[in-house]
Amino acid sequence: GNSVTQMEGPVTLSEEAFLTINCTYTATGYPSLFWYVQYPGEGLQLLLKATKADDKGSNKGFEATYRKETTSFHLEKGSVQVSDSAVYFCALSDPYGNNRLAFGKGNQVVVIP
Amino acid sequence: EPEVTQTPSHQVTQMGQEVILRCVPISNHLYFYWYRQILGQKVEFLVSFYNNEISEKSEIFDDQFSVERPDGSNFTLKIRSTKLEDSAMYFCASSERWAGGRETQYFGPGTRLLVL
């Protein structure tokens, strides 16, 4: 079945550092790929998405490119801020299903001033 | 900006009791979903709902669970006889349409359920 794997463990980094969160997936066909973010005390918010191979999603300085050859959708930001501290979830949606999302475990990102 | 709302934010119940979790999806959305996240684990799909019926359910969504759209605005998840392992954060989501999986789902803030 469809699944998403995110790198283990929280990520702690200093303000203005470069952020990468790895995401790989297993799916049949051509899923759509999403990054959701959860700020403390809030629900999941869509950060960005890509719906076909080689598409790049971007929002708020974050980027991720849909790489079919490596089945990956890594999230990057060039210069993080304290306000980027949150939990980041990678997810995929099966194009033949009923919009069911399969999520990765999430990564806690803590940005230190 | 329209948003999905959920009530209550926290619910504590005794094992064996029934609970109803409530959600108000975004008003022009047609597809509704429930997900849950057990502490430390992945967010898991429970059920999707369209046109007043279940369109897909996961293996987790057994006979103790049910969903309903009792009126034009609410979407509820009922757990008939709660178990300890039902303790989790429950998220409601909605989307405007089906688009081959490309459609964005908008999530509520969640209800944290604790079964004692």
Image (tube, coloured by chain):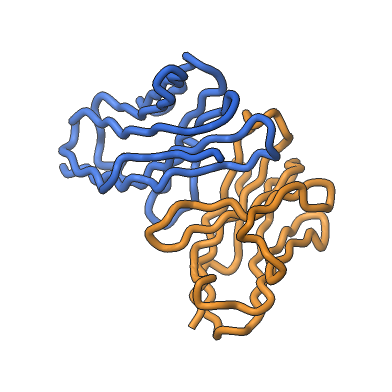
Chain colours: A blue, B orange
B12 relative to A101, above or below:
below
> Residue A22: horizontal and vertical position, in percent?
33, 33
Q: Residue at x 45, y 53 (%)?
A: A42
Q: Nearer the viewer, residue B19 or A23?
A: A23
Q: Residue at x 77, y 61 (%)?
A: B68
Q: Quadrant of residue B72?
A: bottom right
Depth check: A30 or B26 in front? Answer: A30
- Looking at the picture, how far across and down is residue A49, in whole percent? 51, 28
Which residue: 62% across, 55% down? B46
Q: In which quadrant of the rendered image does the N terminus of chain B lie? A: top right
Looking at the image, residue A42 lies above or below residue A70: below
Residue A58 appears in which quarter of the rendering?
A: top left
As rendered, which of B104 and B27 lies closer to the eye?
A: B104
Question: Horizontal and vertical percent for residue A13?
Answer: 18, 39
Please tell me which residue is depicted at 49% across the width and 52% down the height of the picture: B43
Does residue B94 appear to the left or right of A105 in the view shown?
A: right
Asked whether, in this view, residue A67 is left or right of residue A98, the answer is left
Residue B16: x %, y % from top left:
61, 84
Q: Is residue A112 left or right of residue A28?
A: left
Q: Nearer the viewer, residue A25 or B70?
A: A25
Q: Is residue B3 left or right of residue A41?
A: right
